[in-house]
Image (cartoon, rainbow, N blue to C red):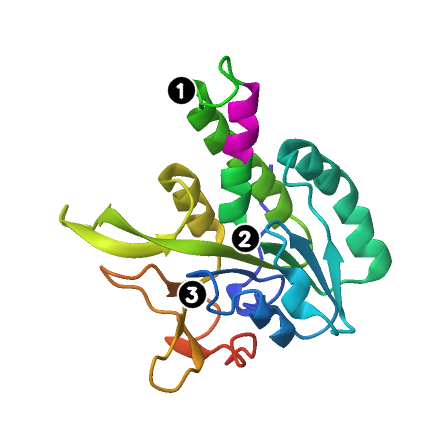
Amino acid sequence: MTINFAPAKGLKRINNWRILLYGKPGVGKTSAIRNLPGKTLVVDLDNSSRVLAGEDNIFIVPFDRQHPSQSMEELLRDIPTTIEENHFDTLVIDNVSSLEKDWFVEKGRESKNGISNELQHYSQWTNYFARIMTVIYELPINILVTAWEVNDDVPNESGQTFKKFVPEIRANSRNGLLGLTDMVGRMMINPDTGNRGVILSGNDFVTAKNRLDNRTASSSEDLFKFDV
């Protein structure tokens, strides 16, 4: 069997990029969608899309938070055709933290006592989240994912544990998603100026990375203007 290969010189860093933007509620993650070039389709997982009112090139997909599993199944079935037929440039999955919470609430309603989650739900979520995000990330389109943040205990390479800002997703699910993502940025508001900025370089205290260009930080307005 002959192995097909091609020179790395021909690869394009910013072709069908995957970006994860996380931060506290209210720092402007959803508002940053306004800065995306081209035509954008937003899956509104937390009902926060009102801040995008008035935008001509942004289109909203409503999401049934009472029945997230069924709503996500319908989305994954229909979205490839929707993207192709309407020539969208970017797909936004707005707030996977909200999806996680709503999924566990749904599973709690289905449990024996109708409230509490059962042990198997946690492994089921890990597999479910990996499956849906793999399907989404395989779509031939730019993809922006947003999440809330949490300050979690995370070990570094030497085994020491630090409080680290990370996307608010359960650790097993989060690690898989981070590995598939080209750029991970933590959004913050400068307390002195009120300007919104994004950290793109990680350390022991902040989860971030950037393999799309050489920036270590960016303003919210310039985040999607790649330095290539």
What is the three-letter code of the residue carrying label 3? Gly
Mark 3 and 1 residues: CB-CB less than 8 Å, in contact?
no
Height in image: 130 above or below 212?
A: above
Q: In this figure, which residue is indicated by the disc labeled 3?
A: 185
Q: In this figure, which residue is indicated by the disc labeled 1?
A: 119
Q: Is residue 16 left or right of residue 89?
A: left
Q: Is residue 89 left or right of residue 187?
A: right
Q: Nearer the viewer, mark 3 or mark 2?
A: 2
Residue 207, percent from left and from top: 33, 59
Distance between mark 3 and mark 2 Cα atoms: 14 Å
State the residue at coordinates (72%, 42%). 75
Distance between mark 3 and mark 1 Cα atoms: 32 Å
What is the three-letter code of the residue carrying label 1? Leu
* Secondary structure beneath label 2: loop
Magenta-drawn stretch, dominant element (helix, strand or loop): helix
Distance between mark 1 and mark 2 Cα atoms: 24 Å
Graded by Cα atoms within 10 Å as few (under 14), some (14 to 19) or many (20 or more), the crowding at tag 2 reads: many
* Secondary structure beneath label 3: strand
Instruction: Pick the residue in front: 62 or 208.
Output: 62
Q: In this figure, which residue is indicated by the disc labeled 2?
A: 95
Instruction: Pick the residue in front: 162 or 180.
Output: 162
What is the three-letter code of the residue carrying label 2? Asn
